[in-house]
Amino acid sequence: MSASSVANRTIALSGMYQAAQCVIDLATKGECDPFFYESSIKSLFAFEPESTLDVFGGDLKNIELGIKGVRHFYDQKGTPNHQQMIKTLLSMIALHKQATKEQDMLKVIHSRLTHIEYKQAHFSDDDNVIANSLSGLYQDTLSQLKFRIIVQGNIQHLNNKVISDKIRALLLAGFRATLLWRQVGGTRWQLVFKRSEMEKSCQALLDHIQQ
């Protein structure tokens, strides 16, 4: 196992964590960090990345929230956020496993993402409009699978259309990051048995950001 492969898995897992944390924040608080929300959403339109980091704009700062989250993930064991996080991450992995059996669906997702990107570039770059389009894509595809991700939070926030659209858009971004994580060798068992390795890798990435 090379250091680079560990770094790639850490980057991808950080993308998963960041999307999941934004989902949790929106569901429970009604808001999330706008910079990291946008960074997660932009990853959906990285169609031909040359590296793992390119999916997230080629800059570790774009997933700093996720890297810090993974770094301290095990320290939060037993807290409400940790319980929600582990449930959300495992749900993303389960959804990915089921979705990869539906190749036609994956083609539809890719096709509609390219259309949304075109619409964003030429007609509207309003965050709410893009979130609505991504939410519709999620509802038409991944949410039709037998397994569904259940988001828990404040019912007032969950019933707010603007917030619920952003949550579904982030779940789509989380799916994208999970697909990336699996592509670079990530497995659910690494979440349990690779604590030291992941913490060291996260710290190395954070040190690089601070340079």
Image (cartoon, helix red, strand yellow):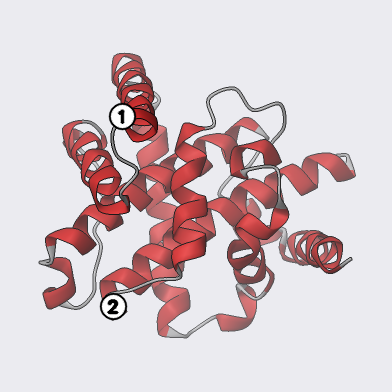
Residue at which label 2 appears: 28
- The quadrant the C terminus occupies is bottom right
Q: Quadrant of residue 121?
A: top left
Mark 1 burial class by Cα count in 10 Å: few <14, some 14-19, many 20+: some
Is residue 157 rendered to the left or right of residue 192? left
Q: Earlier in the sequence, mark 2 or mark 1?
A: 2
Residue at 62% over, 46% down: 12
Q: Residue 198: image x %, image y %?
A: 74, 60
Name the residue nearer the viewer: 125 or 182: 125
Helix, strand or loop for disc 2: helix
Residue 52 x, y percent position in the rendering: 68, 37
Looking at the image, residue 113 sits to the left or right of residue 158; the answer is: right
**Compared to 190, does 179 lie above or below?**
above
The amino acid on which the numbered mark 2 sits, given as a three-letter code, is Thr
Instruction: Report the residue that reaches farthest toward the bottom.
Output: 79
Give the residue at x 25% y 62%.
151
Which part of the image, by quadrant, shows the N terminus?
A: top right
Judge depth for marks 2 and 1 and give the one in front: 1
Q: In x, y percent, where is residue 26? A: 31, 70
Residue at horizontal 48 percent and vertical 43 percent from the top: 42
* Amino acid carrying mark 1 in the image: Lys
Write the residue at 72% across / 65% down.
195
Q: Which SS class for mark 1?
A: helix
Q: Is residue 10 above or below residue 84?
A: above
Is 154 or 210 nearer to us in this picture? 210
Provide residue 147's location: percent of width, then percent of height. Answer: 24, 42
> As displayed, is residue 115 above or below residue 190?
above
Q: Residue 141, relative to residue 89: is it above or below?
A: above
The residue that mark 1 highlights is 119
Q: Closest to the observer: 144 or 187? A: 144
127 displayed left or right of 45? left
